[in-house]
Amino acid sequence: MQLTVLLIILALLTVIGYQMGRSRAVASVGGRIVELHSVPSYHGFYVALWAGLPALLLFAFWGASEGWLVMQMVLSGLPDRLVNGDAQSLGLLRADILNLAHGVTTGREPDPEVVAAAERYLRLHALGDWSLLVIGCCIAIGGLLYARGRIDPDLRARNRVERTVNIALVICSLVAILTTIGIVLSLLFEAIRFFAVVNPLDFLFGTHWSPQMAMRADQVGSSGSFGAIPLFAGTLLITGIAMAVAVPVGLMAAIFMSEYASPGLRTWLKPILEVLAGIPTVVYGFFAALTMAPFVRDVGNSLGLSVSSESALAAGFVMGVMIIPFVSSLSDDVINAVPQSLRDGSYGLGATKSETIRLVVLPAALPGIVAAVMLAVSRAIGETMIVTMAAGLTANLTANPLDAVTTVTTQIATLLVGDQEFDSPKTLSAFGLGLVLFVVTLTLNMVALRVVQKYREKYD
Amino acid sequence: MTDLVEQDTRAMSVAVTKSRYQSEEFSARLRRRYAAERRFRIAGMLAVGVASLMLVILLGSIVSKGYTAFWQAQIRLEVTLDKQQVEERNYTALVRQALYAQVPAATDRATRRSLNDLLSSGAPYELEAMVNANPSIVGTTQTVWVRADDEIDQFMKGFIRRDVPESERRLNDVKIAAIDALVANGSIRSTFNTTLFTAGDSREPEQAGILGAVVGSALTLVVTMLLSVPIGIAAAVYLEEFAPKNRWTDLIEVNINNLAAVPSIIFGLLGLAVFLGFFGLPRSAPLVGGLVMALMTLPVIIIASRVALKAVPPSIREAALGVGASPLQTVTHHVLPLALPGILTGTIIGMARALGETAPLLMIGMVAFIVDIPGGLTDSATAIPVQIYMWADSPERAFTERTSAAILILLAFLILMNGLAVFLRKKFERRW
């Protein structure tokens, strides 16, 4: 609430600052704008930036650190018997305080100390918000007055404003790097915690996947073994099926569209394929689970084969359909990039169109096509919804496409959906799988990009 | 005459050279080559045909499964709003009595008990809401139409067949007889299913709606847009217009290209570890969903914006710089406005992708079962694709129908957005 008010006040002050700076600059030279170093609006921006930016930075800093700071203060005020536990009980204590503070009842009778802590948490929170409001306003008004005082015909307002904007632009472009760092660090940290419990070699080369941890010593079937080979095998199987569908169909479609289809037909066909690319994956998943899987099962049964109700074939086939436009549009681009002179040379020697395509155009476009296929593979490996909905959950080590298999992404999704404790190897193993997934897809992308870069300029 | 002679000689000369080009072997080879050409061409057409056919099958199966969800069976009740029972808030009894009155044949207790399942379990609440809205009707007899149970609805739509043996049917013979009686006296009708558009999620298919998910999706998209559009455009402007060509900017470029291809579920893991784990933001909140989606769509927007900026010819920049504009003024006054349509198109496509994305939202807990319509960015919420995922898992036949209907609604949004993008591209397309 206070934060919203602060933002509104800041917005107002910024607008006021702009007007103030502008009119003061004009007034300082008595209306002869020529005598100003920068045009009046830059003076306006200058004051507005001083009014808005420092307070906004404070706001952002506070927003990112408030929860942690307040919690630290609350914890330091608690008696030792509560705080002096291991990391796990401390985490539990934090969760209890937060739950109580937000009015979530947990069913357990809370410790009076914890209740007091929750109240203190709320009080400190409110205090923090109010002080932020006051300090933020002070900083904003102070900045506004300071900048207003500096307005002068010789003030290099434009240079200063532009430098600030430039810095902002650089920061924006760094967000991409920050995201990557965030991904790598979050995956690494959690994966390291996982590998502290489970040997990485067992994880990468073990052949038994059963992430349920035993709650009691005598429990059956909950051994908690983390051999990921069946998941990798399942992922590869489904990816293989998807590629067997997507590569021939996508490639032939691209060839047909770029070499045979008339421009009129092309304007119709391309959007149709693009629609296929724009359909959300959850829709494909629904289609795979409710239409394709029963169809595959019925056909298999009528042929006398035993097909499980969630088969790798159905999921892989639908995934292949999803990837067709991806392969076709990338291949289309590279095929179009092959210069016409090569084709003309081939026709001049008397080759038919298909011979030209097979013997001249495709070899010339091969690096691009290989890259397209690689990107498609990485996409198939990372696809989640289709396999989660249609490929099953049982970790089978099988090459039979009619069996149910499970994949890396399915396991990540099922391990982390629902309320989980965050310290058990079961949930942490999802981050281990995520790390493998990230490394594999990243490698494929890098190789694909490198291939394109290396061979692209051949004809330019 | 002369013609004939000439032809003759030509024929003769050809016959004399008796070429390899007219040998049996050659024409056979030519036939083979032409046949190969035809086959190749047909293979291409087949590929395009298969892709289009799959699209038709996909959409066709969803439409044929989903269109029935837009209708819902209702049962007419003549409810006598007895004052005492209203005061005791005993609406269940009121509804049941009215129902028994509609089916006079049902007299014994067992039959009546199975009649109770004809109505949606929400029917008493509908009545209560009606009374609360207009207390003056207490004591009168009102004709109300209340929702039928989902299985009655499915039966009316013909999805539960009468000719299967009773033991394998979801409705027993007593209920079917009661339904027939209701149909006979005109007490069942099929109306437009407004619940689907005005309610949140529910365990009962006939009470479940998509509105909560639509609001959740909208809130998520707002956060995504507010973050990714300004940052994305700013990053694109910097990289395209100001950045020096050095190792750092190369690194940023490679990074952006890689991010565009990182599987979406990885972004979900990032959101889980950083936004929920580290910053302690609330689970299931559109705020977190929007943050994750923003990071995901950022590369898409940056790449599209850079293409649009690149398409603005350098002469415009040179002219602006020539009359004394600063580099920043050149960009903000001249280059950006010209590139804006292209940037907008890319942004809309990125937003459409974010709208359809499911996996990252599963990771940050937007799969929770939430009945209420979310009111703010930190409320628990779900999104349309996640709602589809959850409904697809429900065993009831009626949820299959509603899943398909939800997919149709989602696709309608996507087609609208993509249509807008295409329209913008066509309208502002410019060749320099």
Image (spheres, rainbow, N blue to C red):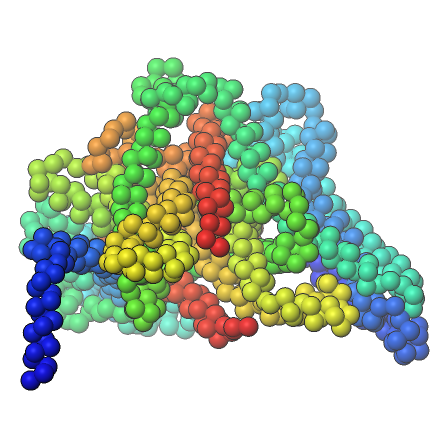
Position in image of residue A55 (x %, y %): 77, 53
Position in image of residue B125 (x %, y %): 36, 59
The residue sitting at the top extreme is A217
Residue under the image location 25 percent in, 57 percent down: A351
Taking the image as drawn, is residue A437 in sight?
Answer: yes
In front: B207, or A207? Answer: A207
The reply, left or right, for residue B19 in relation to residue A88 is left
In front: A10, or B356? Answer: B356
Q: Say which quarter of the image contains residue A21.
A: bottom right
Position in image of residue B15 (x %, y %): 8, 64
Q: Say which quarter of the image contains residue B242.
A: bottom right
Position in image of residue A133 (x %, y %): 76, 53
Pick the quarter of the image with the N terminus of chain B. Answer: bottom left
In the figure, A442 relative to B212: above or below? Answer: above
Pick the quarter of the image with the C terminus of chain B. Answer: bottom right
The reply, left or right, for residue A382 in relation to residue A304 is right
Residue under the image location 28 percent in, 72 percent down: B143
Q: Say which quarter of the image contains residue A185.
A: top right
The reply, left or right, for residue A226 in relation to residue B31 is right
